[in-house]
Amino acid sequence: MSEVTIKVRQSGPYLVKGPILVTDCDGNPYTVSGESIALCRCGGSKIKPFCDGSHRENGFTATERVVPPNVKF
């Protein structure tokens, strides 16, 4: 089975690669073609849950990084 990876893009979408199934809140599947998708995280996309590039125009910024293992919450 292929591996699924999710990459957080700086001030952009989540890039998801691998065999995935995306469903709405009722469990209905979205039609997804290709080996990767971009999921919106700025909230501005007109084709949610998918990215349409709105983050480039609406001022969305995010710079999440992995927390070092020695940091306690």
Image: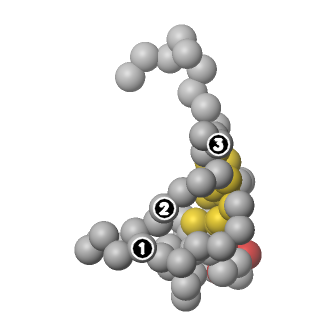
Q: In percent of the image, x 65 and y 65: which residue is there? A: 37
- Relative to 37, is 5 above or below? above
Check the image and name the residue furthest to the left.
26
> Is there any visible trace of residue 45 in the rendered image?
yes
Q: CA distance from mark 2 to mark 3?
A: 13 Å
- Residue type at tag 1: Pro
Q: CA distance from mark 2 to mark 1?
A: 7 Å
Query: Dividing the picture into quarters, in which one does residue 25 lie?
Result: bottom left
Question: Would you call the spot at circle 1 few (<14 residues within 10 Å), some (14-19), or many (20 or more)?
Answer: few
Left-right relation of 28 to 17: left
Check the image and name the residue furthest to the bottom.
46
Q: Earlier in the sequence, mark 2 or mark 1?
A: 2
Question: Circle 2 is placed at which residue position?
Answer: 21
Q: In percent of the image, x 67 and y 53: which residue is there? A: 17
Q: How is the image coloured?
A: secondary structure
Residue 29's label in the rendered image is: 1
Query: Dividing the picture into quarters, in which one does residue 15 lie?
Result: bottom right
Q: Nearer the viewer, residue 28 or 69?
A: 28
- Residue type at tag 2: Leu
Image x and y of residue 58, in percent: 64, 79
Q: Secondary structure at mark 3?
A: loop
Q: In percent of the image, x 66 and y 80: which residue is there? A: 52
Question: Circle 3 is placed at which residue position?
Answer: 2
Image x and y of residue 7, in percent: 67, 48
Left-right relation of 23 to 65: left
